[in-house]
Image: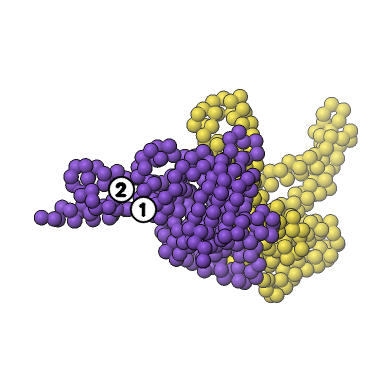
Amino acid sequence: MNDILLRAEELRYTYDGGDAPALDGLSLRIRRGSRVALMGANGSGKSTFLLCCTGVCRPQSGRLEFGGEEVSFRKKDLLRLRRRVGIVFQDPDNQLFSASVLQEIAFGPLNLGLSPEEARREAEIVMERLGITPFAHKPAHALSGGQKKLVSIADILVMRPELILFDEPAAALDPKHAAIVNRIIEGLTAQGMTVLLSTHDVDYAYGWADEVILFHEGRVLRQGPADEVLRDREALLAANLQLPAVPRFYDALCAAGVLDPSVPCPRTMEALETLISARRAEP
Amino acid sequence: MLSLDKLCYQSKLRSRSAAEKFAFAVLTLCVCVCCRRAAVSCAVLLAMGLMTVCRGGVPLRRYLRLLLLPLSFLLLSALAIAVQVQPAPLDLFAVPLGGWFLTGSSAALAYALTLSVTALAAVSCLYFLTLTTPVPELLDVLRWLRCPKLVTELMLLIYRFIFVLLETASAIGVSQRCRLGNRDGRTSLRSFGQLGAVLLVRSARRADALYASMEARCYDGELRVLPESRPPRARALLAVLAFNLALVLFTVWRGGMG
């Protein structure tokens, strides 16, 4: 079985009337079942790449493969691709168009050819899972930003894709809803779903991702394990990012002699706290 | 717009079948307009008021305030019908204006009043529908009535985007006011123009983004919508028919259509 789910080779894409290419020879590989964070400055090509992955933007050159097959941009093939790749957009207001939450979530299943009864059942299962059943008959404009985000995630989950793309999922959310969204993403990856997520949150990416891909001017600046890429100060600086808090504190504590540098740097703040407590408890 | 939508979602009649409410409002509106009798219109006004306020739970003051909006227009129109400038005085009143008279007849006044109350009753039918039936359910009824798909799809998108644009306009308005964009009449006018221009551009962008998001969910040119409305009950439809039949019979008994 092919371990690579998505492969991009030398993708180039320039928006109509755009001066600079949004993707300028972008090449990368995504393994099946992995958790991948796309990071980089605004305008580095993350969102454009996600749109290419669902066939909304068609690269002017290069090769994009999904599941070992080259992505074809013929209408029939695109529909097949979109059954397998779902995208949650950054701004839910650009995604939600139906007059009620139930109709919004049932839109995808109906397009997949399910009967209204089946589409309703599928929508109800996802609403229950995300805790949005009380809003089923509410219009989108009556929801808060966080609730809209949950609906926009339900929109995609209900289609049961193999690969799910999140474009800055926690942007503009309050901490409570950001935590809910992050928990949902954790749940998806725990089920073995491949998740590709674009974010500026280095701390979240450091704790969550298996792999981090740094984008810079439409190209991949660096791709690798999160604990390697997100400790590369030079690459982070080029991508307008900062070192995550955990390795920053870890380095400082090692330098101060509080921690032993031979112990690997933990991935979360909680794990770092445990490490410090264990160290202090030592005789 | 926002308050009407809110009232509709809070209505106690919201859970009733949209087809029943649609039949009641539209059939009664047609009968009211065709009969054009003051007594029939008053009965319709009362029935719709009772249904909207007592059964639907819309606060009376809100409902009366809503009715005042069309009433002010209707009274002005009625005034234009009832008051005339004529060379000879009419039977009701006459104010000499040089060689002419500002005058009115009792027949014209009766006609103006009948017309006004009929129009107000027709508006009350539409208020009943608006204040008790959410748009998604109304669209279900229109689809069931074989209304062209293009119309219902446009209505759906317009309904959604009215609120998105209102939110955007409100945010831009606040931002303009925070920077003294309403300092004087001239500045306000310029700010308003800029707001319109920005809204136009943002609408176009939103339309693009929305299309992309729909495509990403396998949209193939047909907007498939899950029906949400309950089927109508025969008893309710019979009650609607009986009410309207009574109005027609009353009109016939009183000497036919006005």
Residue at 66% x, 53% y is: A73
Residue type at the position of mark 2: Val
Which is nearer the eye, A92 or B94? Answer: A92
Q: Tell whether A55 sits left or right of A238.
A: right
Identify the subunit bearing mark 2. Answer: A
Residue A246, numbered circle: 2
| Helix, strand or loop status at disc 1 | helix
- Residue A207 - label: 1
Q: What kind of colouring is applied to the model shown?
A: by chain
Q: Nearer the viewer, residue A134 or A184?
A: A184
Q: Are marks 1 and 2 in contact (CB under 8 Å)?
A: yes
- Can residue A131 be seen here? The reply is no
**How many angstroms separate mark 1 from mark 2 (CA)?**
9 Å
Q: Identify the chain of the residue marked 1, using the numbered disc in the image.
A: A
Mark 1 or mark 2: whose residue is earlier in sequence:
1
- Specify the quadrant that holds the C terminus of chain A: bottom left
Q: How many marks?
A: 2
Q: Nearer the viewer, residue B221 or A223?
A: A223
Q: Residue A108, position in %: x, y? A: 61, 61
Q: Can residue B232 be seen?
A: yes
**Farthest-out residue, right:** B87
Q: Is residue B2 or residue A77 the one in the foreground?
A: A77
Label 2: state its secondary structure.
Answer: helix
- Vertical side of A79 occupied by A18: above or below: above
Three-letter amino acid code of the residue under disc 1: Gly
Q: What is the display colour for chain B?
A: yellow
Extreme-bottom residue of the structure? B235
Residue at the spot 44% in from the left edge and 48% down from the top edge:
A223
Which chain has been coloured purple in this picture? A
> Residue placed at 20% from the left, 49% from the top?
A259
